[in-house]
Amino acid sequence: MQTKESKKTVMERRTYERIPTNMPALYRLKGPAAYKFFESTVINMTPEGLCFISQHKVKPKMKGQIQVELSKKDKVLLEVEVRWFKPADSKNGYNVGVKVLTETKL
């Protein structure tokens, strides 16, 4: 049984606060369609991870890549691992939370 002292809110467990964004992105996750990138939008980010919209159901621990357009001239390719997912607020697709493993400037 948890006591009041052992219960922590999500913000108390989180190392960094999420920063809302609306950045275009492309993603591909390991699996049958791993060769193809799909369009997406990054909806928030932290120094260690981000949340994007996926049209595909995913599973925690899946690995993949996300290409994010930081500006018209700056793009990065991120190697990521899925940490969580849930149905998107818009009911179209899923919000997917990933941890960034590596980053490469394009």
Image (spheres, rainbow, N blue to C red):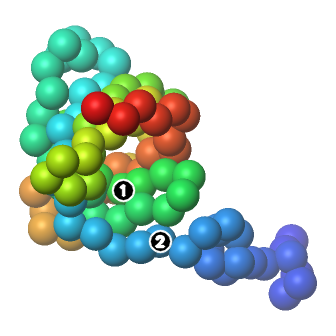
Q: Is residue 77 left or right of residue 35?
A: right
Left or right: where does residue 2 sit relative to residue 68? right
Q: Which residue is mark 2?
A: 18
Asked whether 67 or 11 is in front, the reply is 67
Which residue is depicted at the point 47% across and 71% down? Answer: 18
Amino acid at pointer 2: Arg
Q: Residue at x 42, y 73 (%)?
A: 19
In percent of width and height, residue 24 lies at 15, 53
Sequence-wise, the earlier of marks 2 and 1 is 2
Q: Are marks 2 and 1 in contact (CB under 8 Å)?
A: yes
Whether residue 94 is visible to the viewer of this picture, yes or no, is no
Determine which of the numbered discs, if any, sits on residue 51 in the image: 1
Mark 1 Cα shell of 10 Å, populated few (<14), some (14-19), many (≥20): many
Tally of marks: 2
Point 34% across, 74% down: residue: 20
Whether residue 73 is visible, yes or no, is yes
Residue 2, picture quadrant: bottom right
Among the 4 quarters of the image, the one containing residue 68: top left
Amino acid beneath label 1: Cys
Residue 15 against residue 84 in the figure, above or below: below
